[in-house]
Image (cartoon, grey):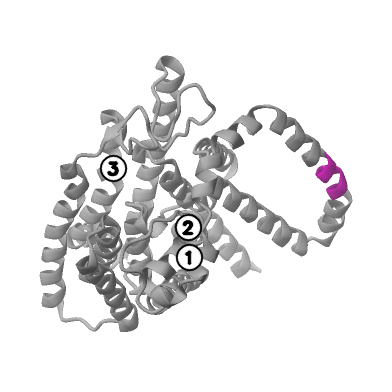
Amino acid sequence: MDRPIVKEARRANKNYLFWLGVVLCTLYQSYRYPLKIGDTGTSPTYSGTPLMLQAGKYILGLPLIAISVVRWLSKSERLPRWSIAIGTLFLSSFSLLKILDGYDSQYLGLSFWMIFSLILVLSADSVSVSTIDKYFLILLVCAFGSTVLQIFLFLAFGRLPALAFEGSYLVRFGGFLDDPNGFAAIWFLLMGWSYKRFEGRTRVLILAGIVVSLLLTQSWTAIAFFLAMLFFCVLVYAAKRPLYAVLAICVLPFFVVFLVRAISWLQESFLGEMLEAKQSSIEEHTFPWTLWASKWTDWVLLGGWRYNTYESWWPAAMVNFGVLWFGAYLVLITALLFYMQRASAKARPDARPVYAGLLLFGCYFAFGSLNLPFPLIFPINALFFLFFFLVAFRKIEAADHATVPTIDRNWHRLEAKATSE
């Protein structure tokens, strides 16, 4: 009988195309911080991205797609949940055809990474939970390491990351992606995974580090989602323990008074300056509903004839692609989140950290798109579809051995106790 480590090595060898795609998406943008390349409009100390670097990720992705297509066709296996594949092909093809009316990189980015993820996942064999767990562990180390490095260079030498303005509080740390908004999504993935993956003091320290790093991105969308998530968790906890709920109700008036006084003090200090400095950014995130409602006949079926850029993705998708495309995309995202939640609920104890991280990542992807264009932000869009398609097409299998020893030991201890009783 083959040992678990041998089986895992064989699976990894068969899935090398999938993992090459994951590595490409994870590391490609890491050139931005050391080379100081980005958007000159939002990063004054940076230079514009050369065309070769903009096209590089597509050039590297195309061979992976081609080889994956050949491998998938040679497997001749039955396609589960074919409606997901058909829906993705429709969404991707429609977006790509919009280029015929006028080229815009947004059409290409939206279309390419959906089809890239779909084909790589279909060509893959079953991916073990333990392999994904190791990837998350490496991602956590890289995320913390790159954030600490950015903070050190800023404090020691005044080195500004992207989306930072000299002489203001608007210094945002976006890790190895050098993108605070996108990196906040990575932090949520690692937050959900770490909460289930670790225990005791280790978990507290890691989660504290993630929360601090999340706040340092200064992403208001991420902070709003974090507070909403925290409030939801408190409600769930209080519902299970009525005594704590009564105590919370008694404390709530004092907390509200403290919060009002704290906000008043912060507005007089640095928060007021931050709000003033971010005023233009806040206005960019406001969608002009009245403008588009007055000319709904121009976009309601097939969308506008040119891409209209807005930070808020969901309403922008409606006016750029039409109601039919918008409805299909909404159904796809909802279905992927549903499959992830169901798989998470049925997962074995050693697999739950991975599913918890992916589920929180997916929820933030959907929620954050109210204020940010995550389906257009590489590599967040690609990583979302790569891992969520894995679950939708049943390509994730439970680990052959425990990936979380502490949880596994506790689980077996509980089983032994139940048996003895």
Rounded to the nearest angstrom, the CA distance separating label 1 from label 3 is: 27 Å
Q: Residue at x 33, y 35 (%)?
A: 40
Q: Position of residue 293 (x, y in %)?
A: 51, 70
Above/below status of 109 relative to 270: below
Q: Earlier in the sequence, mark 1 or mark 3?
A: 3
Secondary structure beneath dot 2 equals: loop
Q: Position of residue 134 (x, y in %)?
A: 35, 49
**Residue 305 appears left or right of 226:** left
Rounded to the nearest angstrom, the CA distance separating label 2 from label 3 is: 23 Å
Rounded to the nearest angstrom, the CA distance separating label 2 from label 1 is: 6 Å
Q: Position of residue 350 (x, y in %)?
A: 46, 59
Query: What secondary structure characterizes most of the magenta part?
Result: helix
Marks 2 & 1, CB-CB < 8 Å contact: yes
Q: Is residue 198 visible?
A: no
Q: Which residue is mark 3?
A: 29
The dot on residue 315 is 1
Which quadrant of the rendered structure holds the C terminus?
bottom right
Q: Residues within 10 Å of mark 3 (few under 14, many from 20)?
A: many
Comparing 6 with 421, the one in front is 6
Q: Which residue is mark 2?
A: 312
Secondary structure beneath dot 1 equals: helix
- Give the magenta part as a residue range: 251-257
- The kind of residue on which mark 1 rests is Pro
